[in-house]
Image: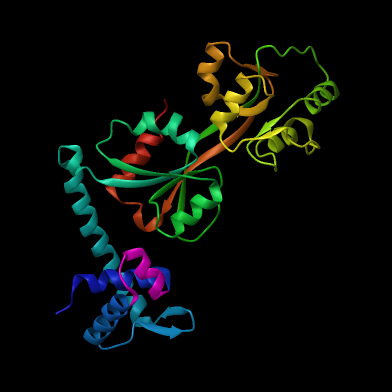
Amino acid sequence: MIDFEWYRSFISIYKHRSVSAAAKARILTQPAMSQHLAALEAEIGEPLFIRAPRKMIPTDKGKELYTKIVPLIENLENTTLEMLHSSSGNERAPVIRIGSPAEYFTIRTLPKIRDLNIRFLSQFGVAGTLLEKLEKDEVDLILTTQKVQQQGIEYQKLEDEVFVAVVPPTYETNLESTAEIEGWLNKQNWLSYGLELPIIRRYWRDHLKKRPDFQPCHVIPDLRSILEGIENGLGMSILPTYLIEKSLQENRVKILFPELTTENTIYAAYKVEHKNSPVLVKVLEALKRKS
């Protein structure tokens, strides 16, 4: 009699093309995964994979089995999630693992998902790191500014961030020409997320049609800390408007050259195989709502 866990192990091996990687994803030992696969192959009577060096290659029978059982198992798992989601009380609420830039999650995401009957496990990082976590099934959903075309991963646009030049309220300028603006900007103390001047380079390219040729005065890999630095007079930076709303209202910073803006698209990314998960669908619906 076939054990349901054999199918789950087979699917994991099929997706990862590796017994060791599949074992890690399922939190099982490698011998246990190999045993599940061997038992399933014995029951079916044919090999499901060709054991190549450092890779498991599905046979025609393996491809056929995968195509047939994945929809059935996904429906079964989604039914379970729906039942959990309909239950009352946080102790029964389903869980979703979200990867995101810390600032965006805190200010833009939390207000949209706070009333959902869903528990979330959050991980913060930059776009490249978050994509790796999604590939390894360490998160279910990532919020990212990079849309990397990759098989098995789907993206949905959430919104466009608008970035502006932010300075302490004491800064005064009376500049009109592009050359004057560029000269003034080059003389300022800049606070940057990284040495490579992320988003500052985009701002320069959009409005000055070149790369910036200065080094940042301070490198702070947290936008909220950069804002705090600007409020304390350490210099200026390019920040998203959603981050500075309260500081603007309290006159702790101001926008310089408000007509010069740069946009950055935020996407939600997830694995196609999970796109029908009722929990994922509900979170995506909430994230796409306007604040």
* Quadrant location of the C terminus in the rendered image: top left
Judging depth in this view, the residue of 229 and 275 nearest the camera is 229
Judging depth in this view, the residue of 17 and 263 nearest the camera is 17
Magenta-drawn segment: 18-30
Work out whether 271 lies above or below 122: below
- Residue 86 lies, in percent from the top left, at 17, 41
Specify the quadrant of the image occupied by residue 48: bottom left
What type of secondary structure mainly makes up the magenta span? helix
* Quadrant location of the N terminus in the rendered image: bottom left
Instruction: Find out whether residue 22 is within the magenta segment.
Output: yes
Q: Is residue 147 visible?
A: no
- Residue 103 lies, in percent from the top left, at 49, 33
Q: Is residue 36 left or right of residue 56?
A: left
Q: Is residue 66 left or right of residue 212?
A: left
Residue occupying image coordinates x 37% and y 28% = 111
Work out whether 21 lies above or below 195: below
Q: Is residue 40 visible?
A: yes
Residue occupying image coordinates x 27% and y 81% = 35
Instruction: Find out whether residue 12 is within the magenta segment.
Output: no
